[in-house]
Structure formats: C-alpha cells, structure tokens
Image: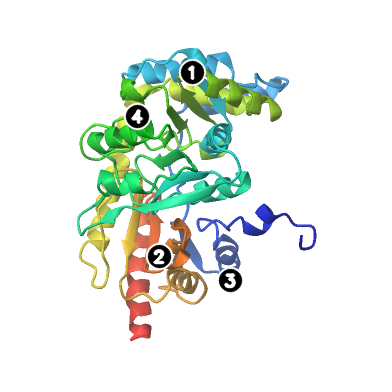
Amino acid sequence: MRTNGISKRGREIPESPLRLLISTAQLVEKTGRQVYYLNLGEPDEFPPQSVSLALADFASRKIKYGQSSGEPELISAWQKYYNDFGVNISTDEIIVTTGASEAILFSLAAVADPGDEVLVFEPFYPNYLSIATLLGLKLRSVSLVRSRESFRLPPFENLRQQVTDKTRAIIFDNPSNPSGYVYSREELASLGRLAAENNLALIVDEVYRELVYEGRPTSILQFPEFKGRVIMLDSVSKRYSLCGCRIGCLVSRDQEIMTAVRHMCQSRLSAPVPSQRAAISALAYGQDYIKSYVETFRARREMVTRAFGDLPGAEYIQPTGAFYAFIKIPKLDNSEKFCRWLVSDFAHRNQTVVVAPGTGFYLKPEDGRLEFRLAFVLENDKLNQALTILREGITQYLKQLN
C-alpha cells in the first residue's frame, strides 16, 4: 500500500552522503565558525579564461532551445578532444548530456529494464545507486580488494561468479570516486572480456580520466575489440572546473543504443545552450590546460599524504587518480556519527571541516562505517588548514571512544 501518496522509488532513494551535512554546516557557519568543505568534488580552480567570454555573449542574445542531442559545434569539439587523445570517434557516436549524471541515467535506461541487475565495484559513486533506484534496477556489488598500498579488482573468476541471468550491465568510474583507484589496462581488458562473455553493456564513467598521477591515462575507448558493447560517459565538470555548467556526453559505437538515447534526449528537449558554448570554449584549450591542472592536484595529493600517511589510527592509501582520499579509521564506531560530530560539536580555533561518511559508498551502509572520503579540492593554504583541523578532529574523537 502506498504511504501518503509517495511511490516506492520515492521512499527508497537514498540521501546523498556528499550533501548529507551541508545544511548542518551552513547553520554552524551562522554562529561564526569557519567551515572548510571537503565533502564535494568541486575544484576550487577557475575555468579557462574564454569560458567567461562565451557566457557573456549571451547577455545580448535570445536563448532558444538547442538540438536534443547537442549543438553540432560542441559535438565536433568533443570529437577533436578525443582525436587528440588518440581515439577516433565519429560525430554520430557522441551525444551531449546535462552533466555526466544524465549520461548515467540514459545509459542505464537504454540497456536495462526494471528488475534487472547492474554490477558495481565497492566503494562506488553514490549516484549509481540513486539513479538505479529511480529506474527500478538492482545494483549487485563486488568489493574491491584493499591492501595497505592499493585497491584492486578481485580475480576474474570471482567477478564471473557475480553475473546472474538478470545482469545487464557493468558500471564503474575510472579513476574511481571515492577511492582514487585507477584501473590498469589489464583490468579493463578483463572487464571487457567479462562483458563480452555474458552479453553485458560495459558502462565506464571517465570524468576524471586525465587526473592520473602515475603513468598515462587509459580510456575504455582504446579497446576496439569491445567497441560494440562499450558506453563511455564524460563531463567538463572536473577537468575544466565547470561543475555548475552541467555539460557532459555519452559515447557509444552501438547505433541502437545511440538511437534509444537520442529519443530520451528529446524528452528533456535540450541541454543548457549557454553551458554548451562554455564547454566548447573550454575544450578548445586542449591538453595544455589539463596538464597544469593535474600538476595542481598532484601537489594537493602530496599534502594529503603528508597529513595522513603517518597519522596514528588511520589507514591511508595514496590515490593514484581523481582528487579524493578514502581513509579508514579502524577504531571508529560509525563514520556518519563521526562526520556529524566534526561539524556540530568539534572546533579547532573556531574552525571545522565537512567530509563525506563512508556509509554512503556501499550497498550496506555498515560496510563503510570505518571510512570517510575527503576531496582535496581547496587551494593550498585552505587545504593545509583543513587537513590540520581534520587530523586534530580524528585524534580527539578517538580519545573520546577510549
């Protein structure tokens, strides 16, 4: 029976662990306490200079609907971007979406029906669960193997055993949010083989692709043997600091999938036209902007490593990609309780921090009760101060538990 007119999906959709404590933090700020936000993956960097000019151009223009699949100039800009990266994509294999979030929604809706299963690797990006819930899909999780130095995929046979007759797709991000893990070329090949053997769609979220700190980034599009089942998701949000523009794209060489997604795009009319112009100007900067961007975050990663690499009571794995650290505190009682305490009850020199509790990155919240995620997205002085406060907060909280 329905309760107060609310649908089953309305009751079941989880609250985002990334935004869980924002309202509490805002109330704390009103008391005069300074809050450093390490919970959202929103880079504290300016986008390329041309973006402001592209947006200002709309001050004297009428803003009409764009084309449902994206403005041709932006599709061509994405095509050139991938060609420069060493991947040849035709314009009919790219669809512009309202952020990568919409690309996740459309890709899952195109390949799976209500009641079907999708394979994910824990810890995973929480929006996969939210969007799967909206679509009536069930996530089936496989835990990444965690050692003292790294995360990694479990053996291939373990993965194969998780595929059922209801499994329709595999979805994951590379590099990973929240772990910062970068899948090796061999692991990507094994996932492609798993998808091929079981007739699954392989949905790979590559919004952090170039944010790799060791070696060169690898795209799933560089595996031509799997091109018939790959759906790649991308965005300008992270690598160009354009989170609020909400422009992403979906790439597939399967025209049946692309036709389905184009029809879905028509139902929402078009992605924001001014934001598409901003994305065109950002993509024109190419790899020079991104190389500088990566070096900025490499320096910030080193700051996090210095702060947590030797912190008593903490297990820290240095991320090899993205701009997140997923930190384990074995003596923690509950990460959500800890994160709330940081915001509500703790202060160091009238300052505190917000981080995301690990409970929201697993299907079973209790599996993340010893972990939290921080995003090293603040400029260096603020980040250094935030890390000092967080270290002190961990130390004081653990003392209370003893």
Q: Residues within 10 Å of mark 2 (few under 14, many from 20)?
A: some
Quick one: SS at disc 2? helix
Between the C-alphas of marks 4 and 1, the distance is 14 Å
In this picture, is 46 found above or below 53?
below
Q: Which residue is mark 4?
A: 220
Q: Nearer the viewer, mark 2 or mark 3?
A: 2
Q: Is residue 153 visible?
A: no
Q: Which mark is residue 93?
A: 1
Amino acid on which the number 4 mark rests in the picture: Ile
Amino acid on which the number 1 mark rests in the picture: Glu
Q: Which residue is mark 3?
A: 31
Instruction: Report the side of 190 relative to 239 (left or right).
Output: left
- Earlier sequence position, callout 2 versus callout 4: 4
Between the C-alphas of marks 2 and 3, the distance is 34 Å
Between the C-alphas of marks 4 and 3, the distance is 48 Å
Q: Which residue is mark 2?
A: 367
Quick one: SS at disc 3? loop
**Quadrant of residue 358 within the rendered picture:** bottom left
- Nearest to the observer: residue 160 or residue 143: 160
In this picture, is 50 found above or below 31?
above
